[in-house]
Amino acid sequence: MDLSLKQIRVEKTPHSRIKSVNFDKLPFGKEVSDHMFVSNYKDGSWQDPRVVPYQPLSLEPSAKVFHYGQSIFEGMKAYKDAEGKVWLFRPQENQRRLNTSAKRLAIPEVPAELFMEGLKALLEVDSDWIPTSEGSSLYIRPFVFASGTGFHASPADEYTFIIATSPSGAYFGGKIGVKIEEKYSRAANGGVGYAKAGGNYAGQFYPTQLAVKEGYQQVIWTDDHKHEFIEEAGAMNIFIRIGDTLLTSPTSDRILDGVTRKSILSLAEAEGIPLEVRKVRVSELVAAAENGSLKELFGAGTAAVVSPIHSFGYKDRRFELPELPESYASHFKKRITDIQYNRAKDPFGWRYAVK
Ligand code: COI
């Protein structure tokens, strides 16, 4: 597919909503910008790439997304630097991962040009929606779903690819407490845990509601077999610091290959921070909390950036994490956001200029 920006039809809204948004006090993911990018898959190809006003969709009740959950998404952000220039962070990683998810859910892959050129065309039209206040960015949500119809349990013949955006502040507000899950599972071997499938998230809501009732914000998922090993936290990958060693679980069938996760691993390696990518037992975490060698627990993800975890619960016990003046979490958050907002050199070539 050879798609240049010229082939993307652009229809601008006559009624911008931008003045109704308080850019100084942005929640995460609630406000939506004026436009969205859309393309439809029909007769074996992606067609009619267009930027149009953000609007409701018209779908048949028999659209397969409603019945069989053929739905995948990505999470990205656009950043504006002090000169007003617009940047993305490792967008090719999201483009590739969308297609990894697509393959697993029997959804046709989205060509790289369609993804990148569609995204750039959208950002050009809605560049005023990229916030500049500290800690805010334009959250980008590319997603693909089965818009083709029929109750037969088989892949649809039509799909819709949309990129919508949301000027957003921090994902978490306040201190984060997590519960280590011992009953429910997020993913199993051979399943779809590594994909960004909508259903992966739906399956987490009920166990998370139970954890919230117990005073936590998030669940830490453990392996589905015996609930012995730390895996991930659903909206983020998990890092553990014991002594000065940084630990995280290897990716697998069950764990999302997070872009922020792999960026932290590259930074830690380059900086000589002792690093172990290996399975971590819950019992090892609890023992480290008991003997005082557990220094940090933090989550990493596009939405969450790098989020320190202040306490964790396991069985009927709750463990508080120490407040460190110089934490790995704040160090990595600064290094990554300095690159994202063009405040520092980019030795890995992660920053991507939007023309
Ligand atoms: C992201 O970090 O962008 C994600 O996709 C997580 C989502 C649940 C907010």
Image: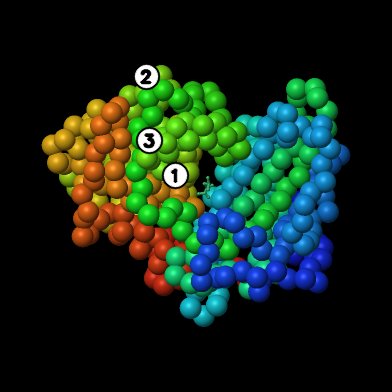
Name the residue located 80 percent from the left edge and 72 percent from the top edge.
14
Q: Is residue 282 left or right of residue 181?
A: left
Mark number, residue 214: 3
Residue 12, percent from left and from top? 79, 68
Where disc 2 sits, the SS reads loop
Quadrant of residue 17 in the image? bottom right
- Nearest-to-viewer mark from 3 and 2: 3
Q: CA distance from mark 1 to mark 3?
A: 20 Å
Image vertical order of residue 196 relative to residue 2, above or below: above
Name the residue located 53 percent from the left edge and 56 percent from the top edge.
28
Asked if the residue at label 1 sits under 8 Å from ligand 1, the reply is yes
Name the residue located 37 percent from the left edge and 25 percent from the top edge.
182
Mark number, residue 236: 1
Q: Amino acid at mark 2?
A: Lys
Residue 206, percent from left and from top? 51, 32
Which residue matches tag 2? 226
**Disc with the residue nearer the chain's start (1 vs 3):** 3
**Disc with the residue nearer the chain's start (2 vs 1):** 2
Q: Nearer the viewer, residue 212 or 232?
A: 212
Q: Amino acid at mark 3?
A: Glu
Q: Is residue 89 left or right of residue 280?
A: right
